Image (cartoon, rainbow, N blue to C red):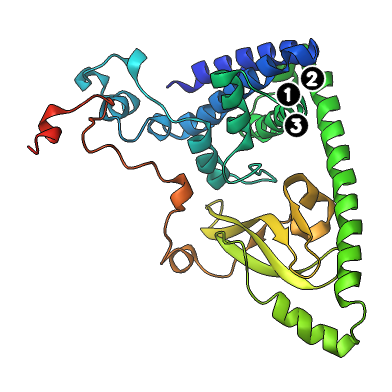
C-alpha cells in the first residue's frame, strides 16, 4: 500500500507490456494484460499519495487497519491485505483531477479486455490494440500529477508511446469525420423537406428529453446539424481556491441526427470537451446526490464474512 512501491511496480509492468507489444500481434494479449496492471498500480499510487486507506478494500477491516497504520491490530499480515481494483480506482482519480481525463466508458473496456485475456485467454487483436493505447493515455495525466518525468517512466519506449498516441488521435479524428458525414445525411433525410419554422418546432420536441443520464447535462449545438441537444458528463469539486463544482463532459448525443461524440472524439469539436465551473455551490449541487449504483460494491453475502469464508454465526442467525 506504499505509493513508492506501487509506482515502481507500475513502471515494471508497463516496461513488460511495451516489450510484449513491440514483439507483434502474437504477444498483444500479454501487452494488454500487463498494461492494465501498470495502469491499475499507477492509479493506486495517486490515491495512496492522498491516503493509503483510499486503496484498501472497504469491506475488509484488516486491510483498513494496515492502511491506517494500525496493522499491529490486524488478524492477517500486510501481505494479505486486500485493495481495490482498476474499475474501483478510476472514479476516485477522475473525481480528484479531471484535466482532459476520461474513462473509456462507465464500465471500463480496459478491465473487460484485460479480464478476457487473464481468465480465458480470449482476445480480439483490434480491440487489444485500442485498449493498450488507451492505457497509455490513462497513464499520461497520472505522470503529470505524480511529477514523474515521461522519459523516466517510458524509458527507451517513449518514441513508441508517442507514435501510438499520435495514431490513436488520427484514428479518432477520421472516425469523427465519418460520424459527422453520416449524421448530416440522416438529418437531411429526416428534416430536409420541412420549412424552417416547421423544422424548428419538430426539433424542439425531438431534443427535449435526455436519453442518457449522468451527473450533469447542458444544452450544446450539435456539430453535425446545429440542433441543440444534451452534453452529459461527470462532476467533481475543485478546492484549488474556493470549493466549486466542475462539470467534465463525457458524451454528446443528438436525437435529431443520431450523432454521438465521446472521449477522444470530443477533443476535436471545440467546447464539447471543455470543463465548466457551475454556478451552484457544492452544498447545493450535491444536496440530493446519490451514488451511481454502477459503482457501488455488490451486497455482501449475508452468510459470508469479510474474508469471503462461510460465517457459521451469521448462517445460524446469531
Q: Which residue position is annotated with label 3?
A: 130
The total number of labels drawn is 3
282 left or right, relative to 256? left
Outermost residue on the bottom side: it is 197
Q: Mark 1 vs mark 2: which is more N-terminal?
A: 1
Q: What's the distance in space between the residues labelled 1 and 2, CA to CA?
A: 7 Å
Query: Does residue 7 show up?
Result: no
Q: Quadrant of the C terminus?
A: top left
Q: Which residue position is annotated with label 2?
A: 158
Outermost residue on the left side: it is 318
Q: Which residue position is annotated with label 1?
A: 150
Horizontal and vertical percent for residue 201?
77, 86
On residue 272, the disc is none
Horizontal and vertical percent for residue 122?
64, 22
Q: Mark 1 vs mark 3: which is more N-terminal?
A: 3
Query: Does residue 170 show up?
Result: yes
Amino acid at each position: 500500500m506504499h505509493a513508492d512501491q506501487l509506482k515502481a511496480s507500475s513502471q515494471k509492468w508497463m516496461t513488460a507490456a511495451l516489450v510484449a507489444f513491440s514483439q507483434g500481434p502474437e504477444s498483444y494479449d500479454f501487452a494488454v494484460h500487463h498494461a492494465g496492471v501498470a495502469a491499475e498500480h499507477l492509479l493506486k499510487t495517486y490515491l495512496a499519495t492522498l491516503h493509503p486507506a483510499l486503496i484498501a478494500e472497504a469491506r475488509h477491516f484488516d486491510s483498513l487497519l494496515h492502511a491506517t497504520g494500525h496493522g499491529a491490530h490486524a488478524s492477517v499480515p500486510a501481505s494479505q491485505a486486500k485493495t481495490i481494483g482498476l474499475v474501483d480506482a478510476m472514479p476516485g482519480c477522475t473525481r480528484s483531477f479531471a484535466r482532459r481525463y476520461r474513462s473509456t466508458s462507465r464500465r471500463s473496456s480496459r478491465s473487460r479486455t484485460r479480464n478476457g485475456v487473464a481468465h480465458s485467454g480470449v482476445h480480439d487483436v483490434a480491440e487489444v490494440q485500442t485498449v493498450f493505447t488507451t492505457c497509455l493515455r490513462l497513464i499520461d495525466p497520472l505522470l503529470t500529477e505524480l511529477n514523474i518525468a515521461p522519459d523516466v517512466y517510458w524509458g527507451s519506449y517513449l518514441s513508441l508511446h508517442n507514435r501510438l498516441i499520435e495514431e490513436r488521435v488520427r484514428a479518432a479524428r477520421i472516425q469523427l469525420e465519418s460520424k459527422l458525414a453520416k449524421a448530416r445525411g440522416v438529418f437531411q433525410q429526416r428534416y430536409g423537406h420541412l420549412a424552417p419554422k416547421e423544422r424548428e418546432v419538430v426539433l424542439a420536441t425531438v431534443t427535449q428529453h435526455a436519453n442518457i443520464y449522468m451527473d450533469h447535462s447542458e444544452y450544446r449545438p450539435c456539430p453535425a446539424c446545429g440542433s441543440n441537444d444534451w452534453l452529459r458528463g461527470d462532476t467533481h469539486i475543485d478546492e484549488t481556491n474556493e470549493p466549486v463544482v466542475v462539470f467534465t463532459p463525457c458524451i454528446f448525443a443528438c436525437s435529431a441526427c443520431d450523432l454521438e461524440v465521446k472521449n477522444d472524439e470530443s477533443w476535436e469539436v471545440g467546447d464539447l470537451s471543455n470543463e465548466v465551473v457551475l454556478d451552484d455551490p457544492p452544498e447545493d449541487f450535491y444536496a440530493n446526490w446519490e451514488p451511481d449504483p454502477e459503482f457501488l460494491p455488490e451486497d455482501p453475502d449475508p452468510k459470508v464474512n469479510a474474508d469471503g469464508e462461510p460465517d457459521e454465526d451469521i448462517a445460524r442467525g446469531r
